[in-house]
């Protein structure tokens, strides 16, 4: 069972906005920054957002991260078919002295 | 081209050992912390271990402490994971990932495609 909690699935139609949540504790999200990753099975995971709400160069501005207290969210606007895949949140945990991940959210574009 | 390429995965019997490698290209490997993360079927990612840019500081998940060893050879741009006393629950795709900076407490800004390790009983 993952330390960070994500909904197992999410879906939307092309053009819609979808939000994926990630819930944790003071020792991880509450104290340290959150990052988000997209993974299409068989490929290398890709960084989508870091330091709570910073978008790496090359990532479309349709992707935006946010954080409040011990919860975080990744919003995807203008949903596109190529956005299908698994999405994971991650943060350093001061109590465990290691990285913790969410269980992943499988995004389906209908 | 900036990339990480893992190798060394395969099928191994429970109790045996395996060494994974991760070769970096297109970047100054010695400037970054590095990590191993694994993904088992039907589960979320699990952080395995991290190493600082100079190889001095190492961190392990309790689930592998005492069995796995992370190391790096900056002259060869290569990260290693020595896995001993393997168990069925170690079965997963193993990814190497690069820290954004020298520290291991920073986010993962580059990942490899992974190598599959299957531990059979």
Image: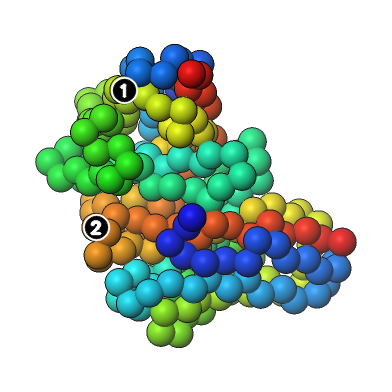
Q: Can residue B53 be spotted in the picture? A: no
Q: How is the image coloured?
A: rainbow
**Residue most toward the bottom?**
A68
Residue closest to the eye, B36 or B87: B87
Q: Chain of mark 1?
A: B
The reply to whether residue A78 is in sight is yes
**Looking at the picture, how far across and down is residue B54, in whole percent?**
16, 40
Q: Seen from this angle, which residue lies furthest front?
A: B121
Q: Is residue B104 left or right of residue A66?
A: left
* Chain under callout 2: A
Judge from the rendering whether residue B90 lies leftward or rightward of residue A13; answer left or right.
left
Local crowd size for mark 1, using a 10 Å CA cut-off: few (<14), some (14–19), many (≥20): some
Instruction: Answer above or below: position of B102 versus B72.
Output: below
Residue A97: image tag:
2
In the rendered image, which quarter is residue A33 located in? bottom left
Labels 1 and 2 touching (C-beta < 8 A) = no
Residue underneath mark 1: B85
Q: Residues within 10 Å of mark 2 (few under 14, many from 20)?
A: some
- Distance from the alpha carbon under mark 1 to that under mark 2: 23 Å
Residue at the image position 35 percent from the left and 56 percent from the top: A99
Q: Determine the residue positioned at 23% across, 27% down.
A: B73
User: Which of A48 and A87 lies nearest the eye of the viewer?
Assistant: A87
Considering the numbered disc 2 on the image, is that residue within a helix, a strand or a loop? Answer: loop
B38 w.r.t. B9: above or below: below
Q: Nearer the viewer, residue B86 or A33?
A: B86
């Amino acid at each position: 069972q993952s330390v960070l909690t994500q909904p197992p699935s999410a879906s939307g139609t092309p053009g819609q906005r979808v939000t994926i949540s990630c819930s944790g504790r003071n020792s991880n999200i509450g104290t340290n920054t959150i990052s988000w990753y997209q993974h299409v099975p068989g490929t290398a995971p890709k960084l989508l957002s870091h330091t709570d709400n910073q978008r790496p160069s090359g990532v479309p501005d349709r992707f935006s991260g946010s954080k409040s207290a011990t919860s975080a969210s990744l919003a995807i606007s203008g949903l596109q078919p190529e956005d299908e895949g698994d999405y994971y949140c991650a943060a350093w945990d001061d109590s465990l002295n290691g990285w913790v991940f969410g269980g992943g959210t499988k995004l389906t574009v209908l | 081209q900036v990339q990480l390429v893992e190798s060394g995965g395969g099928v191994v019997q429970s109790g045996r050992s395996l060494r994974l490698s991760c070769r970096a290209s297109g970047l100054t490997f010695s400037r970054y912390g590095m990590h191993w993360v694994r993904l088992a079927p039907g589960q979320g990612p699990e952080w395995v271990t991290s190493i600082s840019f100079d190889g001095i500081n190492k961190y392990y998940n309790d689930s592998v402490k005492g069995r796995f060893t992370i190391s790096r050879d900056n002259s060869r741009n290569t990260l290693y994971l020595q896995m001993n006393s393997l168990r069925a629950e170690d079965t997963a795709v193993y990814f190497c990932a690069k820290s954004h900076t020298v520290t291991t407490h920073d986010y993962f800004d580059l990942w490899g495609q992974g190598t599959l390790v299957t531990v059979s009983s």
